[in-house]
Image (cartoon, grey):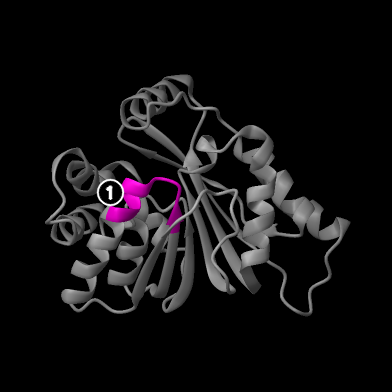
Amino acid sequence: MTASEFSKTAAALYASTTGFRRQMAVYRPYICPFERVAECVDPGSRVLDVGCGQGMLLALLGVSGRCSEGVGFDSDADAIAVAREMATHYEAQGHPGALRFEHLPVSAAWPEGRFDVVTIVDVMHHVPRDQRPSVLQLAFEALRPGGRLIYKDIGHRPRWRALANNCHDLLVAREWVRYTPITQVRLWAGELGFASSDPQRINRLWYAHDLAVFTKPGPDAVRGPLMARSA
């Protein structure tokens, strides 16, 4: 599906949402490359979305057939209320799969179970710096062997795109962006035993995005320094 198709889908799913939150739902697919994230998710996956916000990513994954069961959590109670309302429209419109949303901070115990995919999209720059490695550790533990962590965050280069990202977050989240370069994220992931593909730089309008896929070793894989160096 294209950004335009995702936007039309969001407009239908968030039809009862009003004001700025509805506008965010309708226009965010033109800013955030959801379609590129979706390409990294195998059809029919069980997905955990960390910092899910209003639940848009899980809904779009479900509509496109990528998600058979989606669980999302976020520390923003208002956003979770919107996500739960959206989920009722999702079900009423006959879309496949089940969506569930929980109000939790990222530092709390994550929803139980093992998932095929964990997504962390535009979240890490909101997490306190000293907690960022532990977020990857929790994602590792939440994945089944062979599962994927799909990581996307705003990019810090070039500087003018980073400035655009900062202005956006000041407007939407009332926060100044505190970047962690994707190279550092890959180092942390490698230390945990993740293998990773080369990160992708995606430019959308005046925004920069870094996208990387990390794979948890399967039952026959050997964790250790070699795996870490290959990440």
Q: Is residue 161 left or right of residue 111?
A: left
| Crowd class of label 1 (few under 14; some 14 to 19; many from 20; radius 10 Å) | many
Q: Residue furthest right?
A: 225
Number of labelled discs?
A: 1
Residue displayed at 45% across by 40% down: 209
For mark 1, what is the residue?
29
Which is nearer the eye, 111 or 93? 111
**Which quadrant of the figure contains the N terminus?**
bottom left
Quadrant position of residue 224: bottom right
- Can see residue 1? no
Q: Residue at x 78, y 51 (%)?
A: 191
SS assignment at label 1: helix
In the rendered view, would you say 109 is above or below 23?
A: below
The answer to whether one can see residue 166 in this image is yes
Circle 1: residue type: Pro
- Left or right of residue 124: residue 29: left
Name the residue at 58% across, 65% down.
148
**x, y (%) of residue 137?**
69, 55
Q: Position of residue 93 (x, y in %)?
A: 16, 74
**Rendering coords of residue 219 (x, y %):** 75, 79
* Of the pair 231 and 70, the residue shown nearer to us: 70
At horizontal 72% and vertical 69% (from top left) the residue drawn is 217
Residue 27 image offset from top left, x and y in percent:
21, 44
Question: Per the image, is 80 magenta?
Answer: yes
Q: Nearer the viewer, residue 195 or 128?
A: 128
Q: Which residues are magenta?
A: 73-81
Q: Is residue 213 magenta?
A: no
